[in-house]
Image (cartoon, rainbow, N blue to C red):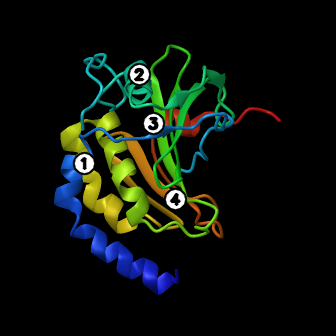
Amino acid sequence: MTALGLGHARLRLVGLLATLVIAACSTTTVVPASGSASPSEAPSTAPTSAPGSAPAASNGGFAFLPDDVIAYYAGLGYTCSDPKPSTKAVGYSFRACTFVDGAGRTRVVGVVVDQAGAFADAFASVRGTAAEPILAPIDALDPLAAFLGATLGKDAGAALLPWLAGHLGDTHSETKVGDLSVATYTATKTDHSTLYVELASQAYLGAPVPSP
């Protein structure tokens, strides 16, 4: 798909927002990713039927607790990893959940917590099949929109949909929701096979990177 084609597809996404507000809060039929390697932590480039438990009094702008988000996606059939030290920030750990959807695309959802177990970052991605070196934004919008609802809550997630629809497929775009930095980006400047959305606290973004 050419850059012009991506632009036209992005414009068409806006007309789907009303439908996706509902889709963001619905469950999705998935095919668990059997035998796939545990995903690595997402690149930290950020400057529904949703989890049921109420968040802690201070939850960094996230609507739900980290364990509830993991449990929600595990309940949809995702295969989730055990906690691992963050490769992006000292003192943080992350868990990631993976599945392959009916079209053969790989979806990843991850949460990052600080040493006290508080939410610090959340990310989601969709990787196209081997035949999709450029993943069309429309093919990633539904699961990434649902992820916003599952982390920020129905109303806040829906409020971000116009921004996400307008920028999904960009090499890198940012906005803010309260104290959270929100970014959508591609794997690299030249690799558009995987599309991401990420929500990050300022403390996480300012943490030192672990030594090699």
The residue labelled by disc 3 is 201
What x and y, as percent, mark residue 79?
Answer: 54, 29
Identified by mark 3, the residue type is Ser
Q: Which mark is residue 71?
A: 2
Identified by mark 2, the residue type is Ala
| Image side of residue 193 versus residue 176, left or right | right
At 42% from the left and 62% from the top, the residue drawn is 139
- Residue 53 falls in which quadrant of the image? top left
At 24% from the left and 38% from the top, the residue drawn is 48
CA separation, marks 3 and 2? 22 Å
CA separation, marks 1 and 3? 26 Å
| Nearest to viewer (mark 4 / mark 2) | 2
Identified by mark 4, the residue type is Tyr
The residue labelled by disc 1 is 23
| Image side of residue 116 versus residue 14, left or right | right
Q: Which mark is residue 145?
A: none
CA separation, marks 4 and 3? 17 Å
Residue at disc 1, secondary structure:
helix
- Front residue of 100/158: it is 100
Identified by mark 1, the residue type is Ala
Looking at the image, is mark 4 or mark 1 earlier in the sequence? 1
Looking at the image, is mark 3 or mark 2 earlier in the sequence? 2
Q: Which mark is residue 185?
A: 4
